[in-house]
Image: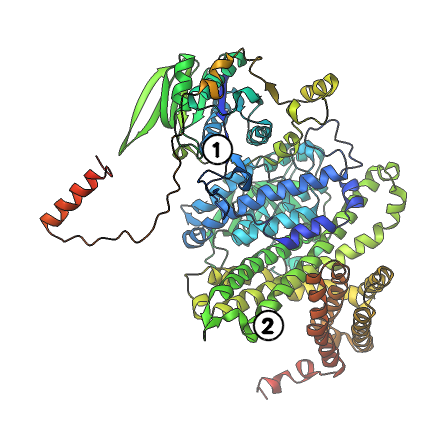
Amino acid sequence: MANFFTDNQDIVDFLDHADLRDLVMLQERAYAEADTCGYAPADYDDAMDNYRRVLEMLGELAAEAIAPCAADVDKEEASFEDGKVTYAAGTRQALDLLGKADLMGFTLPRKYGGLNMPVTIYAIAIEMVSRADASLMNLFGLQDIAETINNFAEDEVKADFLPRFSSGKVTGAMALTEPDAGSDLTNVQLRAAYDEGEDIWRLSGVKRFITNGCADILLVLARSEPDMAGARGLSLFLCESGPEIRVRRIEEKLGIHGSPTCELEFSDAPALLIGKRKRGLSTYVMSLMNGARLGVAAQGIGIAQAALSVALDYAAEREQFGQSIRQFPAVRQMLGEMHMKVETSRLLTYQTAIAVDMAHNLERLQKSGELKDLPGGEKLAHDLRRWRTLARALTPIAKYYATEMCNEVASTAIQVLAGSGYMKDYELERLYRDARITTIYEGTTQIQHNAAIGYVLNGTLEGECQRLHDHLSGLGLDPAMLEALAEARQWVLEAVQYANEQDSDFRDQETGRLVEAATLVYNGYLLGEPAMRSAHRRALAENYIDEVLPQVRMRRDQVLSGNRTYLDRMPELLGYE
Amino acid sequence: MTLEIIVCVKQVPDTENLSGEAMKEDGTVNRSALPAIVNPEDLNALEMAVQIKEAHGARVTALSMGPPRAAEALRECLYRGADRAILVTDRRTAASDTLATSYVLSRAVRKAGLADLVLCGRQAIDGDTAQIGPQLAEKLGLPQFTYVEEIRKIDGHSLEVKRSLDGGYEVLRGPLPALLTVTSSANQPRPPSAKRLMRYKKALAPCECPGEASEDALLGLRARGLLIDQWDADDIEADISACGGSGSPTRVKKIESVKLQSEGQKQVEPSREGLGALVEELSKEHIFD
């Protein structure tokens, strides 16, 4: 039986070696539910065994039932007729199976029928589903919608809606984007008016590019304070699908054909306020989007893994000039780079997920007052700030890095197959199309860079690198590797210092480069500990140092050049003088 | 209406995913080299039972006869919706052919309390006999519906099924209790449920408990719904002479390892005579009768 979990040594290895003791203890509140719930774990080993078993079950489902339908889903597409959206047959079957397998309330608390899994495990699950069918991620991988309800809604709203998500009976959508509010959500205009007579909110206006907008339950960002411009006038609402919410059309897209992208018209649609007024964008949507960004990072890894697998298989079998093409240095380089990028993205994404889990659990338990009574709770509480900052810093970084990587890998995989890769006979052309959205939705790469740059300029990431440096040095990592990493860190510091001395226009211009340089160094440090485990990971880390760290120096040189052409000489550059 | 449904399942070597060492040199199946799975069509039978449970209410019992490791197959059934599991395991039942197996299963079904429905997979992928269902029905004195693809109607007293035939199907009605054998075209078996997987991974048959399982430990498992009932030949009041080798008239005369080779090509003249000669040859070789 094909299985996307057991065939992926990188993932299996992560679960075998990661020390998630604190994380799982917090997630399970010191295993408090073991006596009252038959499927709650009794201790750490039990929990890890649960994670492995569930992932192995999903791995088989993804490989045996979902992946074989992906080509048909792409061809059939979600369709729209008479105001009604219909998923492709393969999508419907996959949703049915995922629901029956109890996987649609992955991270929700058990009291609402969920599995109470950490985000770290959910990220692995999203990767496997995306490897099977990237478009399905938008149905399976957007459970953050339910998670947002869990985090911010009133108890009775949770009790009403969350079990429906867990059972797989409903799907969700987040309705944020509007024709004039894309990357700039502060400009959202959809109107929310409070109907005092009925004690209910009503929404009116148009949303565009809404992934799975035909969902049963929508979280909608709307302007509840008509006199207040910008983010402060926005609140978050929950709507159920109904006659007041009309799908006007669905988009024809380059990829992820199984996922309907809808234009929605709200006509006095009844809505529930989630959380407090005016905090819609600043608190709730940011939380929602951060979850979704991590999900899209995992989606990117899944697509890249699918492309890499095809390229590796093909290169092993295809012969030219009397030998397997894998023997040619140019092909080896492509395969090796793809492999390195996929595994590096995975490390970064898991590290991000761990930070998100730690921060989220510590916050939740501190708020409920339970933290101090948990084993080591007080000590862990000291780290809350660090985890929270790390989660905020790494989420946009993982999203940008894994999704840019995904596009590169999908493209390179086609290059390995050359003419055959370009044809529809192989799934690479679909993967290449599906990959393209990942650097765009849930915030473009450029928006992710903007979200991360503060943590590069203020030294947060540098502090983390120093921390890892000390840790690896204590473990006895090869001094030559540590030295190379320290040198690259110095390059980042030089670039950051230079940028900090320039005006804000220049810093804005260099944002992408600075974030990329800092990310490449941070990733290098993440490769350090695994490098001490096996020959494969040692080769990976050493190759990374030789191949990737010079790119940090290049970015430093680019920053230090002080080039202001795009700022000052754009008309000349474009020939408009 | 709560129907009592018993689903008979067999743990089999995974012959559909063959690896290099799947067969021994003497042509028999190398069981140790193959992963053990629940016989695929038994999962179709289980799925049918669980769908009846979801639609009408039922208690689904998975029943297996086999060595202690067959408890794993029963856990698989619990993951996929069975409410209760019974393992019949006894060295004295080893080497049973279909006659002895169906006898042992009939004793176990009687001990379990007569069900409204007994479901079996059409046939197992290791033996391919398709005999257990019909023999079990006969021993239990139940009407049997074989090759069932669909249950069209069911109430507490009767059912209507669609059974597949060569080149068509027929619809049959009959009384309950009854025995059905279910084909792979009946449904797509559901994956294990994550929640049930995490719960029932801890289900154990007494023979799997470390050391001598204490009475308390077994009671604890039962209280948590995690005990796989384990019966031996005495528990089901089986006549030992009808079990195992002594109850099995089947004798294996010879096992031949057939290697299909592509050399057997033959040019047939595209003429009436050529085709006639081919038909005659096939008929003589009993390739078709």
Examine the rendered structure and indicate whether residue A156 appears above or below residue A461: above
Give residue A140's position: percent from left, percent from top: 57, 46
Instruction: Write down the residue under mark 2.
Output: A333
Residue displayed at 60% across by 58% down? A300
Query: Are callouts 2 and 1 both on one chain?
Result: no
Q: Is residue A205 visible?
A: no
Tag on residue B39? Answer: 1
The amino acid sitting under disc 1 is Asn
**Circle 1 crowding by C-alpha within 10 Å: few under 14, some 14–19, many from 20:** many
Along the line of sight, the residue nearer the viewer: A562 or A296? A296
Query: A500 or A391: which is nearer to us?
Result: A391
Residues under numbered marks 2 and 1 in contact, where contact means CB atoms less than 8 Å apart: no
- Badge 2 crowding class, 10 Å Cα cut-off, few under 14, some 14 to 19, many 20 or more, is few
Q: Is residue A147 visible?
A: yes
Q: CA distance from mark 2 to mark 1?
A: 45 Å
- Mark 2 residue type: Gln
Q: Which residue is painted at 64% across and 50% down in the image?
A: A124
Label 1 marks a residue whose chain is: B
Residue A260: percent from left, percent from top? 49, 51
Looking at the image, which is closer to me, A562 or B88? B88
Q: In the structure shown, which secondary structural element does the residue marked by tag 2 occupy?
A: helix
Name the image quarter holding residue A239. top right
